[in-house]
Image: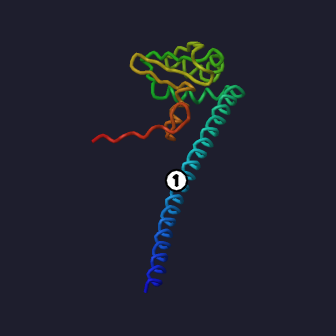
Amino acid sequence: ARRGDGHRGRRGAGQQAGAALARRMGSLHGALGGAFAQVEREAADQVVALALEVARHALRATLAIRPETIVPVVQEALSSLFDERVRVHLHLNPRDVELVRGELGERLGAGNCEIIGDATIEPGGCRAQTPRADIDATVETRWRRTLAAIGRNHAGTLSAPVEEQP
């Protein structure tokens, strides 16, 4: 009977060792799965950040090559402000002043709008001001709004999740 006891003891020890090995392998598998998921998240974030950087450079290149893209920006910024009784100050990059005057001069004159060349405004953007309102349609502000709409911060990385208020 002793021989059988020894054999059962070894078999029991082997089963315990096998179970321990299975637990360790399961734990390792879970850890590897988590590590791969983290690598995928980081790689995806880097791809999106790269795509945003390319888009930002493309936007700047478009504004340099096609300065007339300022016209619809000005029209949109002014559309909510026009009231013939209110004076509007339209701040534009000096490079864009003549283009906007040429395209929208009649409408701006009829709308009591004064164009101001402002070197602090990047080409392709504008700021419209009245005594009651200020419309910021600068390139930087529009870019920040675009990033915010896709859940990114000003650097192009994922924004921190907003915690819900109780």
- The quarter of the displayed image where residue 103 is located: top right
At a point 47% along the width and 72% down the height, the residue shown is 13
- Quadrant for the C terminus in the image: top left
Q: Which residue is mark 1?
A: 34
Q: Quadrant of residue 160?
A: top left
Q: Residue at x 63, y 43 (%)?
A: 47
Q: Is residue 57 left or right of residue 106?
A: right
Q: Which of the two residues, 23 or 18, is positioned nearer the viewer here?
A: 18
Number of residue marks: 1
| For residue 63, side relative to residue 75 (left or right) | right
Quadrant location of the N terminus?
Answer: bottom left
Residue located farthest toward the bottom when viewing the structure as drawn: 1
Residue at 64% in and 40% down: 51
Q: How is the image coloured?
A: rainbow
Question: Taking 48 as reference, is 26 above or below it?
Answer: below
Q: Is residue 138 above or below residue 19?
A: above
Residue 6: % across, % down = 47, 79
| Tag 1 secondary structure | helix
**Who's the residue at 49% across and 20% down the image?**
128
Please give left or right for residue 130 compared with residue 25 in the image.
Answer: left
The amino acid on which the numbered mark 1 sits, given as a three-letter code, is Gly
Q: Position of residue 46 (x, y in %)?
A: 61, 41
Residue 78 in picture, x, y percent from top left: 50, 25
Pick whichever, 163 or 145, lies toward us.
163
Frontmost residue, 2 versus 58: 2
Q: Is residue 96 left or right of residue 5?
A: right
Position in image of residue 81 (x %, y %): 45, 24
Against 25, is 74 above or below? above
